[in-house]
Amino acid sequence: MTLEQLRLFVAVAEREHVTAASRALHVTQSAVSAAIAALEERHGVKLFHRVGRGISLTEAGRLFLPEARAVLARAAVARNVLEEVGGLKRGTLRLVASQTIAAYWLPPILVAFRQRYPDIEVDLAISNTLDAASRVRDGEAEMGIVEGVVDDPALAQWPLGEDHLTIIQSGPQFPHTISRAWLCAAQWVMREQGSGTRAALEHYLAGLGIALQDITISLVLPSNEAVRTAIEAGAGIGALSSLVVAPSLQAGTLHAVPQTLGTRAFYGLRHKERYRSQAADALLELITQQKR
């Protein structure tokens, strides 16, 4: 039983005339007759009385007609849902972002997206970079935005934005030259393993010939805010995104090392083989527009 067979049956039942139904639906009389015959043969019932040139519903036809109409109505609703999703009038965009991005970089973009597409719900999960990649790979999120490079052949990855890391401490006194010895002697407050912020710091230190075993790590904390607060309390030094520390630098509760760590990219992630919705494409287009 197909939707086309149901459509032709309803048209004939409402008009009690095969020719009128074929004209209304712009199909041949033979196609209409074949559809009705296929339904009757498949289910072993007669849907119409055929007396001379006249046609009318049998008892089975009368019982079947409201059900056929209901199926066609539900199919129309389903079609409308797909059209609304395709036209960004309905749907949910499931995202996952690492902490810095989710808390500081992404919210203004999501506000603009919501204003442009008010009927699209955004479901945002927050994870560190490795967990975010796992969610995209497993299909829990359609798209991810992370701070670190992800080595996963199942995922496509491309740059979307950038920031830079800043080494900070609570006091204003720094040496004139930030030496390897000073960095190794300091007490460090670090993000957890799997964090893009931590990976970027490790990469920077490696460029100076410093491995993690060469430094003293006093605390490992699971969020940017926890690291920032601990450093403000005098726990040592750390490296956080410029987006994270900007308010504290302005307030004077933190002070930045006068040395740049360079920029780092924010990356989009998606599964190479999963469908990407028009809502995801619309968000990416908005991000591109705001970068110009």
Image (cartoon, rainbow, N blue to C red):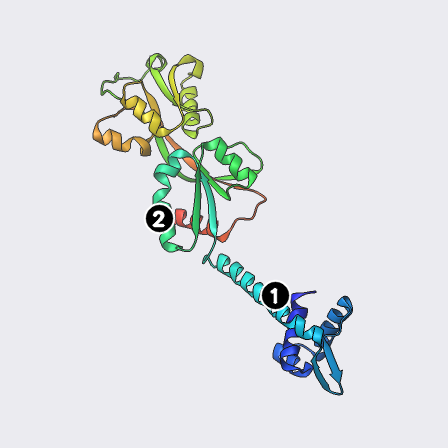
Closer to the camera in the image, 285 or 85: 85
Q: Nearer the viewer, mark 2 or mark 1?
A: 1
User: Which amino acid is tagged 2?
Assistant: Val
User: Which amino acid is tagged 1?
Assistant: Val
Q: Position of residue 262 (x, y in %)?
A: 36, 29
Q: Using the rendered view, name the quadrant where residue 196 is placed.
A: top left
At label 2, counting other C-alpha atoms closer than 10 Å, the crowd grade (few under 14, some 14-19, many 20 or more) is few
Q: Is residue 96 above or below residue 56?
A: above
- Residue 111: mark: 2
Q: Residue at x 75, y 67 (%)?
A: 43
Closer to the camera in the image, 3 or 161: 3
For disc 1, the marked residue is 71
Q: Position of residue 25 (x, y in %)?
A: 62, 77
Q: Quadrant of the N terminus?
A: bottom right
Lateral position of residue 271 relative to residue 216, left or right: right
Residue 257 visible somewhere in the drawing:
no
- Label 2, secondary structure: give it: helix
Q: Using the rendered view, name the quadrant where residue 75 is placed.
A: bottom right
